[in-house]
Amino acid sequence: MKRNNIITNQENKLATKEELINLLKKHRGILTNPILDYLNSLVELEFSVIRNYISIEEREVLSELELYKKIATYNIYYRALQLLDHEKNPIEIDNNERLIVSKQLENRRVKLFCFDYKDRISLSKNIPDDYKSMKIGTVTLYRTLENKDLREKELNRILERLESLYVANNPYLVRHDVIGGPDVYWERQHKEKIEELEKKFTELDNKKELTEVDKQEIQLTNYIHQLFLTDYGLTNEDFEESKMSKFTTAEIDKMNKTQVKKLPNLTISDQIHYL
């Protein structure tokens, strides 16, 4: 596979093709021939593991095997490189248990694809020595879209929020003889919220006329996004909007949306950025 147009820093910890083929040989007589043929096709990169070529029941059973995790991770990683290798323009890849694909467009770096396959086990839990996570990881797709109506609504929302913050009074008693305290904390947080919203308002207001770089980002991200959807056998309708935690105190950002598609031990995330 040629990689003339891929600038890459590879330090992955994936199994090699030879290792996977040897593992498959050891599973003869344990797994059925159709399943072995399916897994071998994944190793040969004939199609994506995300495609619905087996039933959800079969996928759930396979997802409990370390063999399947290794093959699925290998398949997702190398099929991504295979797809992106056909791009005419140089793209950059950074990898250290996360395959991050991006492209520099003048003054901004645009993310195109990410596959995070690093195991993250909480050290606070009592994990048995022989425990092995079967989690394959998270695939993240990116796309940028223009939405003038949403932009105007968000501008009005931010403006209303700012107006309420401008006239808000510190609810705590100001004590000049005390260093720190809730009154000082409130003032600092209040100032930071105003500065953050003023910055967002300016950025959105400047997007009433898209720049050439904005247009390039929209075209490129949507092309790469569709490339992966086609390879995975998915459509935009297969994703569900991710709900924000009701416990979060973060400012709502309507100009960014996350949608997800769940498979056993694997999540496909669709990150949408509106201009």
Image: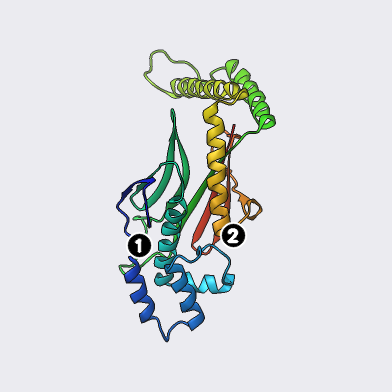
Residue holding disc 2: 233
Q: Give the residue displayed 48% in from the left and 83% down from the top.
A: 33
Above-or-below relation of 252 to 3: above
Secondary structure, mark 2, is: loop
The outermost residue toward the right is 149
Nearest the viewer among 110 and 180 is: 110
Above-or-below relation of 24 to 86: below
Q: Amino acid at mark 2?
A: Gly
* Labels 2 and 1 touching (C-beta < 8 A): no
| Quadrant containing the N terminus in the rendered view | bottom left
Q: Give the residue displayed 63% in from the left and 54% down from the top.
A: 235
Give the foreground label among 2 and 1: 2
Using residue 136 as the reference point, say whether residue 22 is left or right of it: left
Residue 236 location in percent, x, y?
63, 51
Residue 7 location in percent, x, y?
35, 44
Residue 125 location in percent, x, y?
37, 59
The picture quadrant where one finds residue 25 is: bottom left
Residue 78 location in percent, x, y?
41, 58
Q: Is residue 250 visible?
A: no
Residue holding disc 1: 126
Q: Amino acid at mark 1?
A: Asn
Q: CA distance from mark 2 to mark 1?
A: 39 Å
| Quadrant containing the C terminus in the rendered view | top right
The outermost residue toward the top is 176
Above-or-below relation of 193 to 233: above
Secondary structure, mark 1, is: loop
Q: For the residue carrying disc 1, how many other residues have a C-alpha within 10 Å: few (<14), some (14-19), or many (20+)?
A: few
Q: How many marks?
A: 2
Query: Which comes sooner in the sequence, label 2 or label 1?
Result: 1
Nearest the viewer among 150 and 74 is: 74
Q: Is residue 227 visible?
A: yes
